[in-house]
Image: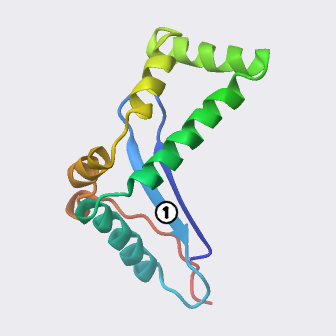
């Protein structure tokens, strides 16, 4: 793939969807890309992510939090968003505390709960034949 990404949609306030997507390289079909992404998601269900990888992800989340606090505008944006979305500016720190405790077995449990290919919706965009 020339690009692969994950995100969630439609937003933060209500339960949302996990979205995995990508752009296939020239000569690779959308179906092949979909199958490869599903293989990666299935691997998360079968094998735990290493403790080192989880620790690296937690460090990245912590760094993102600290970077958002390095200015008055960043702090105001984060606290205002938390107040608007969750009803309390304090909730943002509770969410971070929870994410800092993430363990490999948590990720495997969540993958087994949510990465069920039979419940997935697939969307693709293709160029029309000329």
Residue sitting nearer the eye, 32 or 54 = 54
Can you say which quadrant of the picture contains the N terminus?
A: bottom right
Viewer-side residue, 78 vs 53: 53
Q: Residue furthest front?
A: 52
- Residue 118 in the figure: left or right of residue 68: left
Q: Looking at the image, is 21 positioned above or below residue 63? A: below
Q: Position of residue 2 (x, y in %)?
A: 62, 75
Confirm whether residue 13 shows in the render: no
Q: Is residue 80 above or below residue 34?
A: above
Give above or below for 19 relative to 15: below
**Can you give x and y, in whole percent of width and height, for residue 71 in the image?**
79, 20
Q: How many tags in the picture?
A: 1
- Locate the C terminus and report the quarter of the image it occupies: bottom right
Tell me which corner region of the image, top left, top right, bottom left or bottom right, holds residue 35: bottom left
Q: Residue at x 50, y 10 (%)?
A: 90
Please give the name of the residue rendered at 27% of the width and 64% of the height, measured from the top-left corner: 47
Q: Is residue 78 left or right of residue 55?
A: right
| Residue located 23% across and 59% down the image | 116
Q: Which residue is mark 1?
A: 21
Q: How is the image coloured?
A: rainbow
Q: Position of residue 17 (x, y in %)?
A: 38, 44
Judge left or right: residue 119 versus residue 37: left
Badge 1 element: strand
Q: Horizontal placement of 68 versus 123: left or right?
A: right
Q: Is residue 70 visible?
A: yes
- Rendering coords of residue 78 (x, y %): 63, 20
Please tell me whether residue 119 is drawn above or below residue 95 in the rendered image: below
Q: Residues within 10 Å of mark 1 (few under 14, many from 20)?
A: some
């Amino acid at each position: 793939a020339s690009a692969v990404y994950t995100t969630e949609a439609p937003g933060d306030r209500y339960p949302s969807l996990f979205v995995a997507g990508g752009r296939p390289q020239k000569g690779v079909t959308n179906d092949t890309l979909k199958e490869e992404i599903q293989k990666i998601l299935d691997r998360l269900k079968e094998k735990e992510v290493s403790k080192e990888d989880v620790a690296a992800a937690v460090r990245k989340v912590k760094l993102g939090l600290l970077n958002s606090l390095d200015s008055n505008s960043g702090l105001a944006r984060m606290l205002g968003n938390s107040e608007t979305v969750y009803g309390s500016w304090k909730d943002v720190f509770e969410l971070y505390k929870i994410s800092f405790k993430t363990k490999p077995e948590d990720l495997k449990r969540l993958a087994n709960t949510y990465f069920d290919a039979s419940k997935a919706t697939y969307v693709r965009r293709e160029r029309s034949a000329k």
